[in-house]
Amino acid sequence: MKIRWSRLWGRIKKISLPDWRVLSLLVFGAFLQGIAFVYLDVGTLALFLKNHGIFHVGIDFLFLAALLPFVGSLTVKLDRRYGYGGAPLTALLTLILVGLLVLINRYGAVSLFIQSLFIYHFIVMILISSIFWTIAHRFIVLRFNSFKFLGVLGSELFGMMVGGIILAHPGGHALAHLNGAVGWLTGLFLVLKILVWLLPVSNETFVRKSGGVQDGSENKMVVCILWLSFLYTAARFFSDYFLYHILVQQQVDIGYVLSNLWLGQGLIGLVIVLLCCRFTYTYIQLFGLWGILLAYTGISAGILWHHPSYVYAGILFVGILGHLCWPYFLSMLPQLLTLGNGRRLRWRRQVIVQPLAVLFAGSSIIMLPLFEQALSLLLIAFLLGCFIIVSLSLYSRFLLHMCQMRRWCSGPLMLISNEVISCVQQGAVSSRVDDVIYFLRLMQQSDYPHYVRYLIHALD
């Protein structure tokens, strides 16, 4: 562990002054994004649930599902163009939010405006998060073994925690929170504008589509990832609805409870980031997956047995583990696919599968009673666990085959099966120099905990 901390300190000392300036902007922008999301979410949900309850949530989810294909195609395009056009889009999203707030202030809590705000706040959070991280990708590597990325991510989590602390007082005014969100989003727009000015990308910059031989193993992996995305998204929207139900049923101060949930998520997230600095991030992320399944089970149990505390605890852990661990997991699985298959897979997930999952959740909320909805979430959690096990098994078999055939070229990996780890260890002590270099590089990319020991052995 001492070696890991010394390596971290050595990297920090090597950062040049221009890099420090860029990193400071990214850290500040991540903080603004975190606190803006807290203000936006707390203000929107408090206003929506106080005025309209949960009767229209299922219908609103259906409208959101109809808009998500357009949102998903935008996020894919932003990713391919490294955030080109992201700053103007942030300004446009903020202006539309201002327009909705003006209408609500002028005409009161009209159902059309409140429901539009509820749907729109999901879109804002999806698009602005995508914009920020694609622009950040111009400057830093978005991996958990990059201390720059951990610093920026930690700043976002700190912003969530600060936002939760500021708003965690009884009797907060929802419209004041939303006005604050507009201010924080305006600050984020200015930071993004400066970052784009520092490293502009031409509007002709894009990632060219490429094909590749698609074998049976890749087909199985693609199907598995699509099912994972569908089940996880449906479970998240079921969980959100159960939270809304508990908040309305218990007649609590909605803004106060939501603020404390954001505060808890930021605090737990900072602890996870610190653990990633000290321990191998792959194992922490995989433990997070099982934490998500337990959280979904707890939410379902809370509804079935009428224990609101189970729902609050489940939402707390689903929120932060879903933010940190799930995107990492879904980004790691396609690393072994051919380039074209990986990009087509992302388009299918965001434009087709996730909207269908929201459509399924919204339809189930409308048609099924609460008890059957909770059972549905329990079944989804079970199926999600099964697909996680299958996907990890497919991933390990596919990676073992690639290691044996020397087909892996670059990119992060997960060394999670004994067969793959044994193959890599044997290759790192091989008598062939090329094999030693290949497998040492593979250990480094996967953040293997004994990489330094094998490196020293190879140098000796």
Image (cartoon, rainbow, N blue to C red):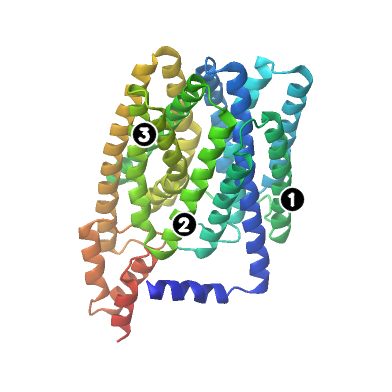
* Numbered badge on residue 273: 2
Q: Counting other residues with Cα less than 10 Å from the Cα at mark 3, is it few (<14), some (14-19), or many (20 or more)?
A: many
Left or right, residue 57 beside residue 338: right
Q: Position of residue 166 (x, y in %)?
A: 63, 43
* Numbered badge on residue 190: 1
The residue positioned 49% from the left and 54% from the top of the image is 270
- Amino acid identity at mark 1: Leu
- Amino acid identity at mark 2: Val
Q: Counting other residues with Cα less than 10 Å from the Cα at mark 2, is it few (<14), some (14-19), or many (20 or more)?
A: many
> What quarter of the picture does the C terminus occupy?
bottom left
Can residue 95 be seen from the camera position used here?
yes
- Amino acid identity at mark 3: Tyr
Q: Nearer the viewer, mark 3 or mark 1?
A: 3
- Asked if labels 2 and 3 touch by Cβ distance under 8 angstroms, the answer is no
Q: Nearer the viewer, residue 259 or 145?
A: 259
- Asked if labels 1 and 3 touch by Cβ distance under 8 angstroms, the answer is no
Label whose residue precedes the other's in the sequence (3 or 1): 1
Quarter of image, res 378: top left
Q: Position of residue 376 (x, y in %)?
A: 34, 23
- Secondary structure under tag 3 reads helix
* Residue occupied by mark 3: 296
Label whose residue precedes the other's in the sequence (3 or 2): 2
